[in-house]
């Protein structure tokens, strides 16, 4: 598992777009007076989406002023949680779960595909500037292992060949379909089984 690094190349300034400013103010309005700093995680997420899927230091400083809180507290939150990217990750960010259930079902076959098709090392953007990948801890879809998250979508019940196809679609500017790649709906049983094997009359 790699350590999250802060980009050496930082923009000099950051501010919310008007749409995101409205969204931030709406979120803050949900908190009682004096508790608006509790919106820091949501505002960091908005900043990340606006800034090509990563959060620069200028955005942390902007949010600190926006919420009237010390910059170091915003920095602590951004550097603690794994869902915040502190350096560029590419348009398509592959997060590969390698926790035990996914590992047992072939997660490292998916890692090998990413090493071959995206970049040899984690957190390194592909030559076309479009994708990057990283190993992560459990993403909460163990029943559908192995799985990956690409940006905000889950791709489940994968194998190396199916992941190769997803990467091919992305390289061809196609949008791959999220969900199960064995045709399951959510976490339904294999073969749409509805009864116990030993109870034929159920």
Image: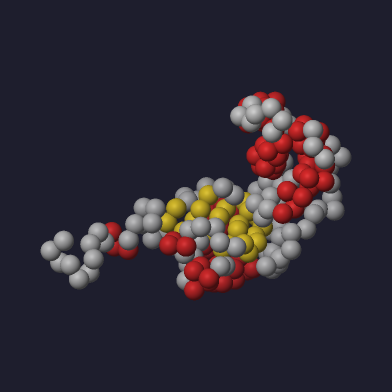
User: Left or right: 63 with respect to 29?
Assistant: right
Question: x%, y% of residue 44?
Answer: 70, 41
User: Residue at position x 78%, y 42% from top?
Assistant: 60
Q: Nearer the viewer, residue 140 or 153?
A: 140
Asked whether 196 or 174 is in front, the reply is: 196
The number of callouts visible is 0
Whether 66 is drawn above or below 5: the answer is above
Point 77% across, 44% down: residue: 74
Left or right side of 127 for 140: left
The residue positioned 48% from the left and 58% from the top of the image is: 141
Q: Quadrant of the C terminus?
A: bottom left
> Taking 2 as reference, is 19 above or below it?
above
Residue positioned 67% across, 37% down in the render:
39
Task: Name the residue furthest bottom.
Answer: 104
From the viewer's perspective, tell me whether residue 179 is left or right of residue 35. left
What is the x, y in percent for residue 18?
70, 26
Determine if residue 118 is in view.
no
Q: Is residue 64 left or right of residue 112?
A: right
For the N terminus, the quadrant is bottom right
Q: Is residue 142 above or below residue 89?
A: below
Q: How is the image coloured?
A: secondary structure
Residue found farthest to the left: 201
* Residue 34 position in % (x across, y down): 72, 30
Q: Is residue 115 visible?
A: yes
């Amino acid at each position: 598992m790699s350590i999250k690094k802060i980009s050496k190349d930082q923009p000099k300034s950051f501010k919310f777009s008007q749409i995101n400013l409205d969204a931030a103010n709406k979120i803050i309005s949900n908190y009682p007076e004096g508790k608006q700093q509790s919106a820091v995680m949501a505002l960091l997420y908005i900043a990340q989406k606006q800034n090509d899927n990563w959060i620069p230091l200028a955005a942390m400083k902007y949010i600190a002023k926006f919420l009237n809180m010390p910059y170091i507290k915003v920095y602590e939150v951004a550097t603690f949680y794994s869902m915040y990217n502190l350096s560029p990750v590419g348009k398509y960010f592959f997060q590969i779960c390698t926790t035990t259930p996914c590992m047992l079902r072939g997660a490292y076959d998916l890692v090998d595909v990413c090493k071959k098709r995206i970049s040899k090392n984690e957190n390194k953007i592909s030559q076309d500037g479009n994708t990057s990948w990283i190993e992560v801890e459990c993403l909460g879809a163990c029943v559908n292992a192995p799985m990956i998250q690409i940006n905000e979508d889950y791709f489940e019940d994968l194998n190396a060949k199916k992941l190769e196809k997803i990467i091919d679609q992305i390289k061809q500017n196609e949008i791959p379909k999220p969900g199960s790649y064995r045709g399951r709906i959510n976490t339904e049983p294999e073969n749409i089984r509805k009864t116990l094997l030993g109870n034929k009359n159920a």
